[in-house]
């Protein structure tokens, strides 16, 4: 289709930036809490936090498992907060066309 070619090159990413950032944060939070697939992927030298929570709970260490679970939650919340701040900053810089 004529007219779809873009020689500027720098238009697509700024327009799609909010969606790209939302996809990244969604994948990060899902990766922090996904256990079912990761149980089969980690090696003997690697300890995933979500798997460590399961192992501690299975061993009867409920308090350390709960603390580790809260650390996973705090990490997800802090990344979500950083995502919000970065998205707000980038939206002001790259989405000026929306304020018109």
Image (spheres, rainbow, N blue to C red):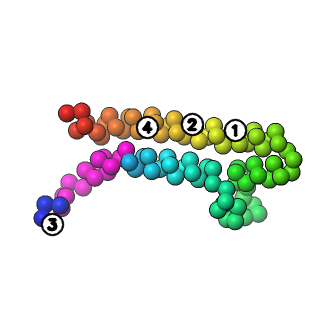
Residue 73 point in image, percent of width and height: 64, 40
Mark closer to the chain start, 1 or 2:
1
Label 1 to label 2, Cα distance in Å? 12 Å
Q: CA distance from mark 4 to mark 1?
A: 24 Å
Mark 1 neighbour class, 10 Å CA radius: few under 14, some 14 to 19, many 20 or more: few
Mark 1 secondary-structure assignment: helix
Q: Could you tell me residue 16's position as x and y percent?
A: 33, 49
Q: Nearer the observer, disc 3 or disc 4?
A: 3
x 59%, y 53%: residue: 31
Q: Quadrant of residue 34?
A: bottom right
Quickly name the residue at label 2. Answer: 78
Tell me how far mark 3 sits from mark 4, CA to CA. Answer: 36 Å
Q: Which residues are magenta?
A: 5-18
Q: Distance of mark 3 from mark 1, alpha carbons?
A: 52 Å
Q: Which residue is mark 1?
A: 70
Do labels 1 and 2 touch, CB within 8 Å? Answer: no
Instruction: Classify the position of the N terminus by image quarter.
Output: bottom left
């Amino acid at each position: 289709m004529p007219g779809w070619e873009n020689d500027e090159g720098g238009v697509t990413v700024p327009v799609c930036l909010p969606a790209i950032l939302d996809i990244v944060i969604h994948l990060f939070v899902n990766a922090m809490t996904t256990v079912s697939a990761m149980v089969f992927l980690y090696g003997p030298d690697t300890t995933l936090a979500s798997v460590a929570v399961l192992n501690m709970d299975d061993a009867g260490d409920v308090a350390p498992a709960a603390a580790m679970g809260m650390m996973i939650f705090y990490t997800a919340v802090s990344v979500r907060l950083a995502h919000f701040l970065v998205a707000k900053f980038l939206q002001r810089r790259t989405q000026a066309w929306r304020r018109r």
